[in-house]
Image: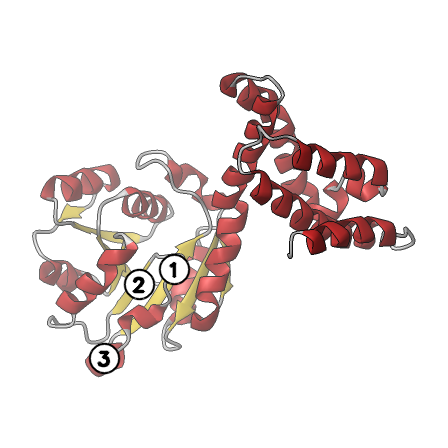
């Protein structure tokens, strides 16, 4: 390893998981500081490291510090750290949406600053670290030691992408689309089946294998090779029936929103279909979609 000594401020799911993951791959983890000493002790015990009673003492033993706290607390921690000796220290946070610019005046204090984000839904303090080897990590920040930060994760076998501060929010948006927003789509599917007489629990179970199978295909083969359904086939009749069924059912939840989502995502699928079948004519499908979009002023 590159000899870095890494400490953690914050002992939640991310702090637990990242510390354990790095420690298991031979990285020198000094320990944890948290407002809750009990949480810090639990994380230190979990990683076989040290509990610190102050950020000052953690900084003394660490040349690199990961701030693994909720996004809204990062600025508060930084304000406190600026009054301490952070010269020549690497200060990192793990927010997906906030860039290293959160440490906006770090150069005044001689510190290097980074955002390091695992592109993975960390859900468990004690188990998520086992899956982090499958995650991509994105890194951006000060030029001085960015290669060292990248090397930490590459040495664990992880894939690392170097990005830029101005792309951070849009990058996070991309992650949310395939993570959180998919939950909304799944919920819409459940609502539709409920309108067809399913109870909620049965609707969720009935859709689960379809959802999991499609997700597996997408991750293994990508959107183009995974595309199936009426849009891909240019099945105008089925598409029109879908649209009519949405418009004509008064018992559908969020009917107008559902129609907009159906049309916008169908338009996206047309583009994927054209990539998969460059000789197939999708113009009539687009005509149906555009006519409906126009009717609701999309």
Q: Which residue is mark 1?
A: 116
The C terminus is located in which quarter? bottom right
Q: Which mark is residue 110?
A: 3
Mark 3, secondary structure of its residue: loop
Name the foreground residue: 89 vs 195: 195
User: How far is disc 1 from disc 3 in space, using C-alphas?
Assistant: 20 Å
Q: Which residue occupies the extreme left position in the image?
A: 53
Q: Extreme right residue here?
A: 279
Instruction: List x then y, in percent, for residue 254.
Output: 53, 38
27 shown above or below 98: above
Crowd around label 2: few <14 · some 14–19 · many ≥20 (10 Å): many
Residue under pointer 2: 92
- Which secondary structure lies at badge 2? strand
Q: Does 272 sit above or below residue 82?
A: above
**Res 97 → quadrant:** bottom left
Residue that appears at 15% across and 49% down: 34
* Quarter of the figure with the N terminus: bottom left
| Label located before the other in sequence (3 or 2) | 2
User: Of helix, strand and loop, which one carries label 1?
Assistant: strand
284 left or right of 132?
A: right
Pick the front one: 35 or 129: 35
Residue 212 in percent (x, y) is at 60, 30
Between residues 149 and 117, which one lies in front from this camera angle?
117
Disc with the residue nearer the chain's start (1 vs 3) = 3
């Amino acid at each position: 390893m590159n000899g870095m000594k890494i400490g953690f401020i914050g002992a939640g799911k991310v702090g637990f998981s990242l510390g354990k993951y790095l420690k298991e791959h031979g990285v020198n983890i000094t320990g944890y500081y948290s407002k809750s000493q009990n949480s810090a002790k639990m994380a230190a015990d979990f990683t076989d490291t040290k509990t610190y009673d102050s950020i000052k003492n953690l900084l003394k033993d660490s040349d690199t510090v990961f701030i693994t706290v909720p996004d809204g607390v990062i600025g508060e921690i930084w304000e406190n750290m600026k009054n301490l000796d952070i010269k020549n220290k690497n200060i990192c946070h793990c927010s997906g949406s906030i860039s290293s610019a959160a440490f906006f005046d770090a150069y005044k204090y001689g510190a290097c600053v980074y955002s390091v984000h695992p592109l993975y839904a960390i859900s468990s303090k004690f188990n998520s670290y086992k899956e982090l080897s499958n995650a991509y990590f994105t890194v951006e920040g000060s030029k001085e030691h960015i290669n060292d930060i990248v090397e930490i994760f590459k040495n664990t076998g992880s894939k690392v992408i170097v990005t830029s501060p101005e792309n951070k929010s849009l990058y996070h948006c991309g992650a949310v689309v395939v993570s959180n927003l998919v939950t909304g789509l799944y919920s819409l599917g459940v609502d539709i089946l409920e309108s067809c007489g399913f109870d909620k629990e049965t609707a969720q179970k009935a859709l689960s294998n379809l959802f999991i199978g499609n997700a597996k295909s997408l991750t293994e083969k990508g959107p183009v090779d995974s595309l199936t359904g009426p849009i891909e086939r240019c099945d105008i009749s089925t598409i029109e029936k879908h649209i009519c069924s949405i418009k004509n059912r008064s018992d559908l939840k969020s009917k107008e929103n559902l129609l907009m989502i159906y049309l916008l995502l169908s338009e996206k699928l047309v583009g994927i279909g054209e990539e998969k079948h460059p000789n197939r004519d999708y113009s009539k499908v687009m005509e149906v979609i555009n006519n409906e979009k126009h009717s609701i002023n999309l």
